[in-house]
Amino acid sequence: MPACGALRPVGKAVALRLAEGGWQAAGQTIALVLTGRRPAPLHEVAAACSAKPTCAAVLVVPADVSREGDVLSLFGALTHEYGRLDVLFNNAGINLKTTPIDEMRTHEWRKVIDTNVHGAFLVAQHAYRLMKVQSPQGGRIINNGSISASTPRPGSAAYTASKHAVTGLTKSIALDGRSCSIACGQIDYGNVVSGMSQQGADGMRKMPQADGSMQPEPLMDAKDAADAVFYMASLPLSANVLQMTVMATNMPLVGRG
C-alpha cells in the first residue's frame, strides 16, 4: 500500500492515480494512507479514491509532518491498520512569497525548513524503518523536490535551500537503502498547477525572472505530474529513477540565466 500527502492538487492527483491501480504486483489490492494538516480536504480526496473500483481501502490520518509526534502517530496508525508500506510519496512542502534574503524573517525561514526538510526527513525516516523490517522487505520512497534546487527564482532563499537539502536526503537514502531493498528517488516539477502556482484563464501565470521582471509562463496539469509519480512507483525495486524533471514544455527553464 502507498502513503502520500494529499491536500494540494499534486498530492490529490497522485492519490487518485495510485488508487486506479496498475502500479502494484498483479492480484494485490490497493490501500491508501492520506495525510495532511486539514482533515476536511483529506476526507474529500479519500472519498474520490474510494470510488475507484480498484481501491480497497483508504485511511485518513491528519498530521503536521514538521511535528515528530504527529509523524509517530501517522506511522502508528498506518502500521496498525495495514502492517506494511510499499510506496511513500513524500509530498509536503510550503513556500514564501518572493522575499529578498535581507528582508526574510527568521521565523519565515524556519517555517519553510521545518516543513520541507525536517518534515521530509521525519516521514522518510519512519518509512525507511518500516520498510526495513517488514516482510517482504523493502519499498519505495519518492521525494518531491523542485527544479528550484538547481535553478532558483529571485527571492527564494528558503525554498531553494530546502530543496537542495531534499536532493541530498534522496541520494543518501538511495545509497543506504541498497542493502534492504529500499529504493529512493526524487521528482522535480517545473510549473505544475498547484497551491503554489495557480493557473490563470490563459493557462499561464506571471512569475519572477532573473532580470527582476514578471513574465507569463506556461503551467503543466497536476494529472501529468501524477503520471510521473505513477511511473516511478510502477518500477520493480531492482530499478530506480533517482531524479526526474517534469516540466511544462515551454517554460523558460532550459537556457535560463
Image (cartoon, rainbow, N blue to C red):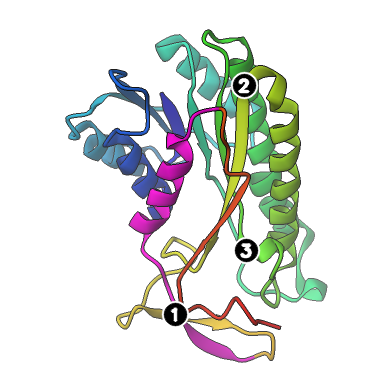
Q: Which residue is mark 2?
A: 181
Residue sitting at x 75%, y 58% = 161
Residue 234 on the magenta span: yes
**Amino acid type, label 2:** Ser
Decide if residue 232 is in sight here: yes
Residue found 61% across the figure and 31% down from its top: 183
The reply, left or right, for residue 6 in relation to residue 102 is: left
Please state the horizontal and vertical placement of residue 155, each as a whole percent of the image.
71, 75
Q: Position of residue 30 (x, y in %)?
A: 31, 24
Q: Residue furthest right?
A: 102
Residue at the front extreme of this rendering: 238
Horizontal side of 184 relative to 15 (left or right) equals: right
Q: Is residue 134 above or below residue 229?
A: above
* Magenta-tinted stretch: 213-237
Dot 2 lies on which element? loop
200 to 236, vertically: above or below: below
CA separation in Å, label 2 and label 1 = 41 Å
Q: Is residue 165 above or below residue 31?
A: below
- Classify mark 1: helix, strand or loop: strand
Q: In the image, what residue type sits under mark 3? A: Ile
Q: Provide the residue designation for mark 1.
A: 205
Residue depicted at 39% across the width and 50% down the height? 226
Q: Which residue is mark 3?
A: 147
